[in-house]
Image: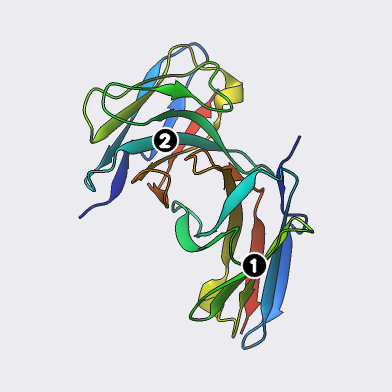
Amino acid sequence: DQQVKQNSPSLSVQEGRISILNCDYTNSMFDYFLWYKKYPAEGPTFLISISSIKDKNEDGRFTVFLNKSAKHLSLHIVPSQPGDSAVYFCAASAGGTYKYIFGTGTRLKVLA
Amino acid sequence: NAGVTQTPKFRVLKTGQSMTLLCAQDMNHEYMYWYRQDPGMGLRLIHYSVGEGTTAKGEVPDGYNVSRLKKQNFLLGLESAAPSQTSVYFCASSVGSGTQYFGPGTRLLVL
């Protein structure tokens, strides 16, 4: 049973436009969410996080939105740049635990 | 700071062979983790440790053992490798339940 789902395996976006990556979860106990970016042959690197007490968190070009009632979060990248081309994973945890459940990832390709 | 390093980067094993993957971190993090990543799947937690001398099972622990004899090192052992253990293995560390910092990965092929 996949508790964290990223239903879009891939996404292509033109440079300068907005990229929207989606993540759905089923466990209502999840209260902390992370996004990681992963380049080929490298480990995932932390991008941005959000706690369930917020519905939005922004860091430069990256914004994460959380809709608790829909059990949905999204990562917006504006403007998208070719260097953003990578696989993006969302991850969730419950109750301050350190055990994160990861989604399957979305491969973003930003076209120059 | 090197962050999180993993040794080796790539290894080929025959079925039944054993090996140990080494993870080292220089950030003085208490928590360390081993994950595996397979095509079409997210990272799945194998084992983790919340401090020196402690280990615990994650989602997919079968066929693996771990040891945390020193705070900075976390070892993942495969006693008798199977083709199903062909994967990319990532180590991570964190301060408590915060952001996890990942190593570059070890690609393992079991024939």
Q: Which residue is mark 1?
A: A108
In this view of the protein, which residue sits in the foreground, B4 or B85?
Answer: B4
Q: Is residue A34 above or below residue B64?
A: below
Q: Is residue A14 above or below residue B3?
A: below
Contact (Cβ within 8 Å) of mark 2 with mark 1: no
Report the residue marked by disc 2: B33
Q: Amino acid at mark 2?
A: Tyr
Identify the chain of the residue marked 1, using the numbered disc in the image. A
Picture coordinates of residue B67, whole percent (x, y): 32, 21
> Looking at the image, is B37 positioned above or below residue B110?
below
User: In the picture, which quadrant includes the C terminus of chain A?
Assistant: bottom right
State whether discs 2 and 1 lie on one chain: no
Please tell me in which quadrant of the rendered image residue A101 appears.
top right
Query: In the rendering, at what x and y percent does residue A62 appear?
Result: 55, 75
Residue B21 as seen in the image, left or right of residue A75? left
Q: Is residue A21 left or right of residue B43?
A: right
Q: Amino acid at mark 1?
A: Leu
Q: Which mark is residue A44?
A: none
Q: Nearer the viewer, residue A30 or B27?
A: A30
| Residue A78, quarter of picture | bottom right
Q: Secondary structure at mark 2?
A: strand
Q: Residue at x 23, y 36 (%)?
A: B72
Chain under callout 2: B
Residue B52 in the image: state x and y as whole percent. 26, 27
